[in-house]
Image (cartoon, rainbow, N blue to C red):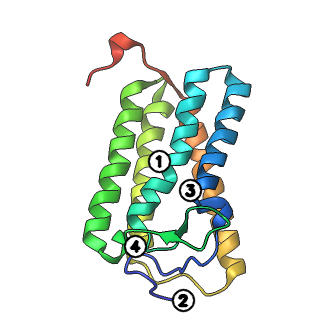
Amino acid sequence: MRGYTKMNALEFLYFPYTHSLLMGAVWGVVVGALYWLLKKDKRGAVIVGLCVLSHWFFDLVVHTADLPLTPFSDYKAGFGLWNYVVVTMIVETLIFLTGTYIYATFTKAKNKSGKWGLWTLVTFLLAFSFYNTFAPPPPDSVTILFYSLIILMGVIIGLAYWVDRNREVAQVRDITI
């Protein structure tokens, strides 16, 4: 459905296993456990798991009432910020820049790729966000949308991986807030 909200042309009808609160908690535990298995870092695993769960709470603010609490419930929640373009752009950009600031503060570049790669990724993500908001709606083809999403996620994940491989955790003395 085109123009479902002022910010998003897609109408989300059924996604209980990816966007319900209960499954957000389940995915948080699964991803946190995988992180722990790979890194043996309990604190990091809890943080990663909570970040996964936080997705639902950030979505709650922007989505219309289409977020299920569980995969088995008909009740859906959402505050509908996506119906207000300017406010949405401000809020989402501030959240993104806050996350960028936290990441840039607690990590430091190992080399030029770590420095310029981070800002290239940030610029790409901001540009894509603005493009996604103001460009024409996507085609009605589910197949085209699916492959476009897979390619986009591959590019974003690849860039993020490359940036993170060229950065390291900053020592406490290196952190200035």
Q: In this view, does 140 lie to the left or right of 134?
A: right
CB contact under 8 Å: marks 1 and 3: no
Q: Residue 20 in the image: state x and y as whole percent.
A: 59, 61
Q: Name the residue under label 1.
A: 121
Q: Can residue 27 be seen in this view?
A: yes
Q: Mark 3 points at which residue?
A: 21
Type of the residue with mark 4: Thr
Type of the residue with mark 2: Met
Mark 2, mark 4: which one is toward the viewer?
2
Mark 1 or mark 2: which comes first in sequence? 2
Q: Which mark is residue 1?
A: 2
How far separated are the C-alphas under marks 1 and 3?
29 Å
Type of the residue with mark 1: Leu
Mark 3, mark 2: which one is toward the viewer?
3
Q: Name the residue under label 4.
A: 133
Mark 2 or mark 4: which comes first in sequence? 2
